Amino acid sequence: MTIISRIQRALVLAPHPDDEVLGCGGTMARLVEAGAHVEVAVVTRGRPPMFDAQQAEQVRAEAESAHALLGVATRFMDLPAAALDGVAHAELNRAVASVLAEVRPDTLFVPFAGDLHLDHQLVFQSAMVAARPRGTAYPRRILAYETVSETNWSAPHIAPNFQPNVFVDIDGFLDRKLEAFAAFASQCQPFPDERSLETLRALALVRGSTVTRAAAEAFMLIREVG
């Protein structure tokens, strides 16, 4: 029995639009193909004056297009992008907890605690608060995904290091992941930028080869309750 077969309802927390596709686009596509319900909650939205309002609308539309390609549901929480440190932690906790209460996922995908972007770190912390194993209604499984240009640039030996212990075979779903990321026209960059289609394909091949698969996405298992 694979981990995919054990997931019926999944929630992916994305600090910003595109993080979810970069980290687990192939896994989401495979879950949907297997009949699971998958939702993405995009936590933040760019707000003026830091971000152009028209650009924020464009990225939101790109996210909707990408999620349609993957077959996943989308919800936008619209907290301020690149400014979550200005949001009261209790408020962020409540916002994340509210989404979990509505979706009731058995599996929660979160950004990695050691990501360079502070928004990622704060979303991870609030996810762990919201997903505490209290009562009966909590995610039975929490997995942290990697985000190129964030997970790989934390300070070595100081910040937590991403050391994956779960690998999801996405052979057959990699092209769909790349198509979904290509939908983020404003974010997708030409190689050798990390946020390029070539880099995403290369990472999937490397992660796959470490477990003798053609392509894979890597995760760190935070907790699983059997």
Image (cartoon, rainbow, N blue to C red):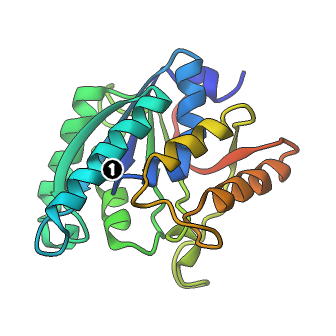
Residue depicted at x 67% and y 40%? 174
Quarter assignment of residue 116? bottom left
Observer-nearest of 11 and 57: 57
In the rendered view, would you say 32 is above or below 119?
Answer: above
Q: Position of residue 160 (x, y in %)?
A: 54, 72
Q: Position of residue 218 (x, y in %)?
A: 65, 50
In the rendered view, would you say 107 is above or below 33?
Answer: below
Characterize the local packing of mark 1: few (<14), some (14-19) or many (20 or more) Cα atoms within 10 angstroms: many
Screen quadrant of the N terminus: top right
Residue depicted at x 35% and y 44%? 63
Residue at which label 1 appears: 127
Observer-nearest of 52 and 223: 52
Screen quadrant of the C terminus: top right
In the rendered view, would you say 29 is above or below 194?
Answer: above
Residue 144 shows up from this direction: no
Q: Secondary structure at mark 1?
A: helix
Residue ranking furthest to the top: 35
Quarter assignment of residue 192? bottom right
In the rendered view, would you say 75 is above or below 124?
Answer: above
